[in-house]
Image (cartoon, rainbow, N blue to C red):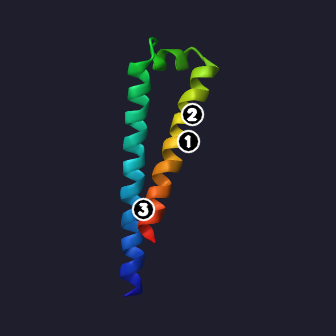
Amino acid sequence: MEFQVILLNVVYAVIGALLTIGFMLVGYWLFDKITHFNTSEQLAQGNVAVGIVVGSIFIGLGVAIGLVIGMGLN
C-alpha cells in the first residue's frame, strides 16, 4: 500500500516536471514571437537584460506549475 503511494507520487512528479518544461518552452517561444528581436541571438550576444527576462519567465512558470502540481499531490 505504501509503495503504491510512493510510486504514484513519483509518477506525478515526473509528469509535473515534463509539463513544466513544456510550459517553459511555450513561454520562451511566445516571448520570442512577441518581441521584435531574436531572443536566441540576443542571448548569444550576451544581452543581460534579455537573459534576466527569460530567466524570470522560467522562474515564474516553474513556481506556478510547481504549486499546481504540489496541490495535486495532497
Point out residue 27 in the picture as x, y percentages from the top left corner: 42, 34
72, 13: nearer the viewer: 72
Q: Label 2 sits on what residue type?
A: Gly
Which marked residue is nearer to the observer: mark 3 or mark 1? 1
Q: Residue 7 appears in which quarter of the rendering?
A: bottom left
Residue of label 2: 55
Crowding at mark 1 (Cα within 10 Å: few <14, some 14-19, many 20+): few
Q: Earlier in the sequence, mark 2 or mark 3?
A: 3
Disc on res. 59: 1
Q: Label 1 sits on what residue type?
A: Ile
67, 26: nearer the viewer: 67
Q: Earlier in the sequence, mark 3 or mark 1?
A: 3
Is 47 situated left or right of 14 in this image?
right
Which residue occupies the extreme bottom position in the image?
Answer: 1
> What residue is at 45 percent from the left and 51 percent from the top?
65
Which residue occupies the extreme right position in the image?
Answer: 48
User: Mark 2 falls on what kind of element?
Assistant: helix
User: Mark 3 falls on what kind of element?
Assistant: helix
Q: Residue 3 appears in which quarter of the rendering?
A: bottom left
- Work out whether 23 lies above or below 71: above
Is 62 situated left or right of 72 in this image?
right
> What residue is at 53 percent from the left and 49 percent from the top?
63
Point out residue 56 in the picture as x, y percentages from the top left corner: 57, 35
Task: Say whether marks 1 and 2 touch (CB < 8 Å).
Answer: yes
Point out the image quarter for the N terminus: bottom left
Point out residue 33 in the picture as x, y percentages from the top left corner: 38, 20
Task: Say whether marks 2 and 3 touch (CB < 8 Å).
Answer: no
> What residue is at 47 percent from the left and 20 percent from the top?
40
Q: Label 3 sits on what residue type?
A: Ala
Residue of label 3: 13
Alpha carbon distance from label 1 to label 2: 6 Å
Crowding at mark 2 (Cα within 10 Å: few <14, some 14-19, many 20+): few
